[in-house]
Amino acid sequence: MAEYWETAHIRGQQTVAVWRTWAPTFTFGDVTVVTLDSHQADVRSIISGLDDIIAAEGLVNAAVNARDHNFDFLADLDVRGAEVISGNLEAEDDLRDDLDEVYAITPNTHTSVVTRGKKLAPVWLKVNARRAAATPPLPPLLVGTVTVAQFQTAVAAHEALTQAVEDRRKDLGKVKEGHHDHVDKVDARNKRWFEAWHGNFAAGSNERDALSGVDTEATSNQPLTALEIDTLTPVGLNVSVTYVAGGGRRAQSLNLLYQIIGVDAVFGHDTTVILDGQTVGPFTAGVTVNFKTVAEKDSQKVEGAVKVAVVG
């Protein structure tokens, strides 16, 4: 299934190709004048905007990992700490009443591990105070190798770690919303350009006829066509890919797939097609790589012919 941005990106690339070929100085818009260069930059930023989303998702994952690591630490110490303290208390020790309040809390949620930890730490500190006052003095009680100070630090940090997850998720939502808005702006301009271009150039002109190279809702029911690779050119450890103009029509998504011979059993790598051409890699020197394109629309899929490049 095509992503929300793919149709606008493909149409934007088609728009830029016609614009650049037939009338690169053409502009439209009065409040905001849209030029070929500005629109091309906006089309390209659809892809760079995906990198921003990936980066924001990475920050969410890092925040979740930090919170969950601390949770696992607290949940474990909440239980083991109570057991160690209980094992060190006499049967009739008054601190058992405090320990009963600890045992009454099940540490299975982010809130409960903190609540139980805040109950456990004071009991642990009281035990340590007693041990320090003993004759001869006893060392502070450890749970494994963990000190009460380390435990308190984790308890104090957990609420902030939990809030950080919510903050990073909100940040991600804003980045995604901004990307959606940008895609909507680009596709609205694709359509405004089409209308302005159609009206500006007379029927029968090369410029008007070139509009047949841009997909619209009116042409969406026409057959899906394959996008063929034109050239594969090794450049160092990378491969430069160009495409045959006019392919991939009516596609909702266009992807370049590749397979490293002797490494991949199938075409296991993919990247979004850039119709102007793109560079893929780096690869290991000497490898042979198969490339092909896949155009998709709803349940339809059309593959281009496989082409081969030897790297290095």
Image (cartoon, helix red, strand yellow):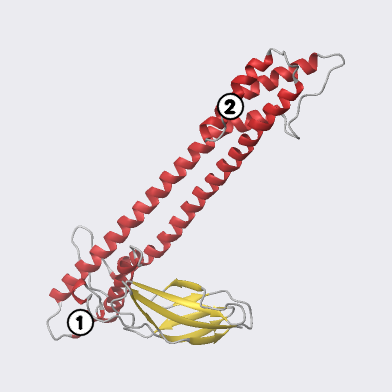
> Vertically, is 183 above or below 70?
below
Mark 2: secondary structure: helix
Place of residue 223 in the rendered image (x, y in percent of width and height, measured from the top left): 26, 82
Between residues 22 and 174, which one lies in front from this camera angle? 174
The residue drawn where x is 49% and y is 48% is: 60
Q: Which residue is mark 2?
A: 116
> Vertically, is 286 above or below 45?
below
Which dot marks residue 207? 1
The residue drawn where x is 31% and y is 75% is: 251
Residue 193: image quadrant is: bottom left
Which dot marks residue 34? none
> Vertically, is 141 above or below 162?
above
Place of residue 36 in the rendered image (x, y in percent of width and height, measured from the top left): 29, 70
Between the C-alphas of marks 2 and 1, the distance is 73 Å
Q: Which quadrant, please, contains the N terminus?
A: bottom left
Q: Earlier in the sequence, mark 2 or mark 1?
A: 2
The residue drawn where x is 49% and y is 76% is: 279
Amino acid at pointer 2 = Arg
Place of residue 273 in the rendered image (x, y in percent of width and height, measured from the top left): 41, 74
Q: Please say whether residue 276 is visible from this viewpoint.
A: no
Q: Please say whether residue 76 is visible from this viewpoint.
A: yes
Q: How many marks?
A: 2
Q: Residues within 10 Å of mark 2 (few under 14, many from 20)?
A: many
